[in-house]
Image (tube, grey):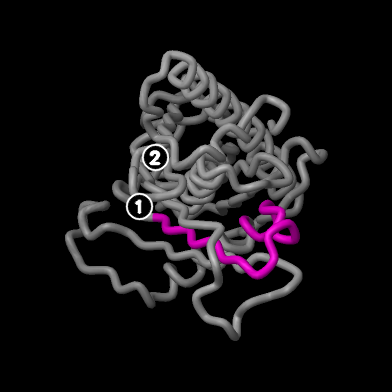
Amino acid sequence: MEYVSPEGLRLDGRRPKELRQLKAELGVLASADGSAMFEMGNTKVLAAVFGPKPVETRSQEDDKRCLVKCEYAMASFSTGERRRRGKGDRRATEITKAIRNCLEQTILVELMPRSQIDVYVQVLQADGGTRCACINAAFMALAAAAVPMRDILASCAAGYLESTALLDLNYVEDSGGGPDVAVAIHPNFDDRVVLLQQDNRVAIETFEEVLQLAVAGCRAVGEFMRQRLLEHTDALAAAREAGQPQEGAADDNEDALDEDDY
């Protein structure tokens, strides 16, 4: 299969260093303290946040930090393969740990001792890049819940096929057998890397090229999320001034989402 045409176009019409279309919506679940729908191309993820709240299991209570719990799952209809996916499968466990690790490095857990935050991430539609989309959705949901964080958390992946570095692989490209590097960064802290996972071996020169492309993709994703958060905040402020119900607002703590935070 030819993944990049002689004209430099990929199967979906993108250039090698072009992101898929990004979409994000906050406050999609009224029952959650914060929620978000995040889309990268045809990959669609729903995230919900509950907390901070008292720790449910007393033995897990920490006097110095907040407990972050995370649960990842894929809907049975998310791909063309209509099969039931168990919560305990190996890939789900791996992605759950990756998401939680990123969130623990981003949330200011020391400001909320003896508390707990539950993050639920559900893949509704999968077309490659689900791990990165889940991390982005979880961050947006936490921001909607006004959870204090160190920085924006942005994630993107890049791969290498037919001697070409490709940004933000879709499912067909991801299945091509080439190396795939998933990255998550804090863009306002000199692109500090909080996640780096690689599939398949690759020469060091190629790895550096793919890594730099993935980091550039993270920066673009981070700027997109920043703009959406500002738009969401402006909409909440306008609704409050007009005396209208604040759609998607979990509670009055949403006021903490202002431009200075991002």
Q: Which residue is mark 1?
A: 123
Which residue sits at x=54%, y=25%?
233
Q: Nearer the viewer, residue 221 or 49?
A: 49
Residue 65, position as x, y percentages in the image = 71, 67
Q: Quadrant of the C terminus?
A: top right
What's under tag 1, amino acid-wise?
Answer: Val
Expressed as whole percent of the image width and height from the top left, the position of residue 220 reads 61, 29
Please give the name of the residue rendered at 57% of the width and 82% of the height, measured from the top-left corner.
58
Q: Quadrant of residue 250?
A: top left
Point out the stretch of residues depicted in magenta: 103-121
Q: Is residue 158 visible?
A: no
* Magenta run includes residue 221: no
Q: Give residue 96's position: percent from left, percent from top.
A: 50, 65
Does the image show residue 71?
A: yes
Residue 259 in percent (x, y) is at: 67, 25
Tag 1 secondary structure: strand
Point out the residue furthest to the bottom here. 59
Report the residue marked by disc 2: 37
User: Relative to 193, is 104 above or below?
Assistant: below
The earlier-in-sequence mark between 2 and 1 is 2
Name the kind of residue labelled 2 in the image: Met
Side of 55 where 190 appears, left or right: right
